[in-house]
Image (tube, grey):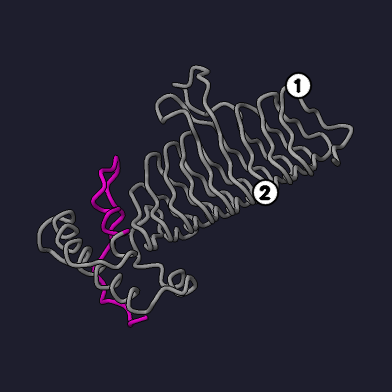
Amino acid sequence: MPIHPTAVIEDGAVIGADVSIGAYSVVGSRVRLADGVILHSHVVLDGNTEIGANTEIFPFASIGHRPQDKKFKGEDSRLIIGARNVIREHVTMNPGTEGGGLITRVGDDCLFMASSHVAHDCQVGNRIILANNATLAGHVTVGDNAIVGGLSAIHQFVRIGANAFIGGMSAVEKDVIPFGTVKGERASLDGLNLIGLKRSNMERANIHALRHVFKALFHSNEGTLSERAEQLRSTHAEPEVCMLLDFVLTDSARAFCTPSSKPEPREAA
């Protein structure tokens, strides 16, 4: 097992098979590294932290240190990171707090580019991309396959739906629907993530159904958003449409990102 002689591994740390730990890295006493984890030089891991199999962490990442939350009183919280993630230089991730269930969780196959941040109590899905300097505040939920563009900031308690796309340099204060695209200094909904939908090989009929539902939800003056979603939920069975409508109908601490205007619908995909 290639462990550099300058690395510091505290008593109690659990190190799996075929783990590589580079020069001057520090592994705290309650850290658990699954098989095949790679730590490059100058990585610091601390706290009650689990790193999944074959995850690779690059220099100067700081993973598992106490949350940046004044309400944190040293409670025994956790950070759980899944398998096959790539965590680049200067990334920071913090464990949970008592106010958020005591667990920050990251799924599998994610890419966290340089200087991105995952705060306390975040729940991050699978195959997520956080581009350079993208930041998640506390209690943020990110659905599978979402992409957060560089220099974007997500407000605490915001939900980012599955397959959503956040444009670079956006400030997201409200929930983002699944398959939605948002952008802007105070981000507004800019339509569906059609490029992502096509890349996922979604059936054309389902893309058209999503487009229809999007227009009915956000470009209609009939009833409230929830009332429109309830009506649409009773007439659609497509899984992707149901995911979007269920997201809208779920109670949330935040409002929704909506279009800043009502443009004509784009050409059919």
Residue 148 vs 198, above or below: the answer is above
Quadrant in the rendering for residue 101: top left
Tell me if 189 is positioned left or right of 71 in this view. left
The picture places residue 88, in percent across and down from the top left corner, at 67, 49
The foreground one among 266 and 196 is: 196
Rendered image: mark on residue 43: none
Quadrant location of the N terminus? top right
Tell whether position 245 is magenta. yes
Which amino acid, mark 2?
Arg
Residue drawn at x 39%, y 63% is: 181
Rendered image: mark on residue 11: 1
Residue carrying label 2: 88
Q: Give the range drawn in magenta.
A: 243-269
Which amino acid, mark 1?
Asp
Tell me if 65 is positioned left or right of 37 in this view. left
Quadrant location of the C terminus? bottom left
Q: Residues within 10 Å of mark 2 (few under 14, many from 20)?
A: many
The picture places residue 83, in percent across and down from the top left corner, at 62, 48
Q: Main secondary structure of the magenta part?
A: loop
User: Can you name the residue that lies furthest to the right here?
Assistant: 5
The picture places residue 242, in percent across and down from the top left corner, at 28, 61
